[in-house]
Amino acid sequence: MGEKNGGEENRVVLRGKLIELDILRHTPGGIPILKFRIEHESSQTEGGTSRKVSCEVGGVAFDREAKLLSSAQLGGALTITGFLDRKGRSRHQLVLHATHIEFETGN
């Protein structure tokens, strides 16, 4: 975490609820991969004013994090740390690449 690439940092920490899980697949090289979607709701301060924030974010997890997430239950709360990248080479849509996943207890 906190690694810099070319002097620019790309680190995201997002807490939310797991709302979609694809099936666990493997890359041609045998690395586990799992696509997911989380829903985030919070209150944030912007320009001195509090506002409600709500969004859905698509993500992908590889290897250890993919295996961990594959056994998660939909609706469970979690915090995902990772980075953003575009979805495919020619698209402008962003995807959260999960590098660390923590499940919230007491749900």
Image (cartoon, rainbow, N blue to C red):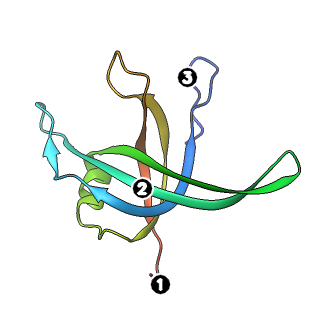
Which of marks 2 and 3 precedes in the sequence? Answer: 3
Q: Which mark is residue 106?
A: 1
Q: Quadrant of the N terminus?
A: top right
Q: Position of residue 26 (x, y in %)?
A: 13, 41
Query: What amino acid type is highlighted by mark number 1?
Result: Gly
Number of marks drawn? 3
Give above or below for 69 relative to 104.
Answer: above
Quick one: SS at disc 1?
loop
Kindly identify which residue carries mark 2: 38
Tell me the distance, in whole angstroms, between the alpha carbons under discs 3 and 2.
26 Å
Q: Are marks 1 and 3 in contact (CB under 8 Å)?
A: no
Query: What amino acid type is highlighted by mark number 3?
Result: Asn
Taking the spot 63% from the left edge, 61% from the top edge, the residue there is 42
Residue that sits furthest to the bottom in the current view: 106
Q: In the image shown, does 47 or 23 lie closer to the viewer?
A: 47
Taking the spot 64% from the left edge, 20% from the top edge, the residue there is 7
Q: Is residue 5 left or right of residue 72?
A: right
Q: Which mark is residue 93?
A: none
- Residue 92 is drawn in which quadrant? top left
Q: Is residue 3 left or right of residue 89?
A: right
Quick one: SS at disc 2?
strand
Query: What amino acid type is highlighted by mark number 2?
Result: Ile
Kindly identify which residue carries mark 3: 5
Q: Are marks 2 and 1 in contact (CB under 8 Å)?
A: no
